[in-house]
Amino acid sequence: MTPTRTGKKLAAIAAATTLGLGLAACGGDPTETTGAPDSQSGDGTITVGSAAFPENQILAEIYAQALEATGVTVEKKLNIGAREVYVKALQNGEIDLVPEYTGNLLTYFDAEATATSAEEVEDALDDALPEGLEVLDAAAAEDKDSLNVTSDFAEANDLTTIGDLADLDTVKLGANPEFESRAYGVPGMEEVYGIDGIEFTAISDGGGPATLKALLDGDVDVADIYSTTPSIVENDLVTLEDPENMIAAQQVVPLINEAKATDEVEDVLDAIAAELTTEDLLELNGKNQGDDKTDPAVLAEEWLTEKGLI
């Protein structure tokens, strides 16, 4: 457990003891659920939610199945929708637990936050969370913007970090339009790493097929692709390291109702965090999005079994 949330944990345990809330059995629509859509979960039940994209659903299944394996009663309300929707569901008691990403969660609750390193983001997030919500241990796994080049381009130009791009006369960069103005985009590349001569090409597909094609065809030298996108591995791309933490940490973290964060629940979720890596997410996403189209529930069970967690 990280020291920054020790106080919150002790307060949550005390509240659970006082109120008797320990576990007894230890682009989507929020009405599209696998649990009761309108009622709050009972004191002995953990209701696990997810955002409306496959990776988050896989993570929610991992949480749910691991908790069930220890005897916790679990309901699932997956594919809820955007952060604005599922955070509201968490705060009003429709769900109790959801997989989140540290950097984006921080800026959701504190739009002025400037923390970027993993430790700084975790510390700031503990302070930014509203009363009643808690984050548990963060995994090493991250899903965030990442700058990628082909292996041939990396080898030809001796590239391993973002800063190495400063040695190039020009850098043809492809990314979503907002990357041109965001602090972790072109401005950060210029100010943090001293990169000049950036020629920006806006590609509006979130690092998807059009961005990948532009990179592979040589129309751009560098592409912003989310770090758990299977195309990175499938095309042997080189993700440039970010030693100055220009791009904020986005570690996978459980966001939970404090009243449901018993010792047993925390132990289960912390064990998952200790095992989950970005490479795991790449593999899970690849199986889900590849030819097999493996279901999130199946992938979760396979991963938990492989890691010895169920």
Image (tube, grey):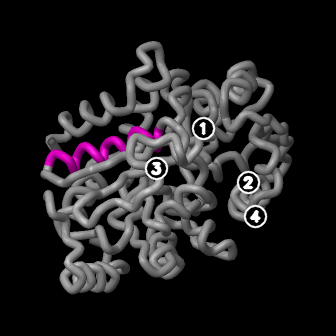
> In this picture, is 259 found above or below 35?
below
| Residue behind mark 4 | 191
User: Counting other residues with Cα less than 10 Å from the Cα at mark 3, is it few (<14), some (14-19), or many (20 or more)?
Assistant: some
Give the spatial CA distance, label 4 vs label 3: 48 Å
| Residue behind mark 1 | 158
- Asked if labels 2 and 4 touch by Cβ distance under 8 angstroms, the answer is no
| Residue behind mark 2 | 185
- Camera sees residue 161: no
Find residue 37 and name its label: 3
Q: Amino acid at mark 2?
A: Gly
- Camera sees residue 195: yes
Q: How many marks?
A: 4
Give the spatial CA distance, label 2 vs label 1: 22 Å
Give the spatial CA distance, label 1 vs label 3: 54 Å
Please tell me whether mark 1 sits on a helix, a strand or a loop. Answer: loop
| Front residue (pair 109, 91) | 91
- Asked if labels 3 and 2 touch by Cβ distance under 8 angstroms, the answer is no
| Front residue (pair 208, 220) | 208
Q: Which quadrant is home to the C terminus?
A: top left
Select label 4 or label 3 by which is in front: 3
Q: Give whichever of discs 1 and 3 has the lower sequence position.
A: 3
Q: Which residues are magenta?
A: 55-69
Q: Amino acid at mark 4?
A: Glu
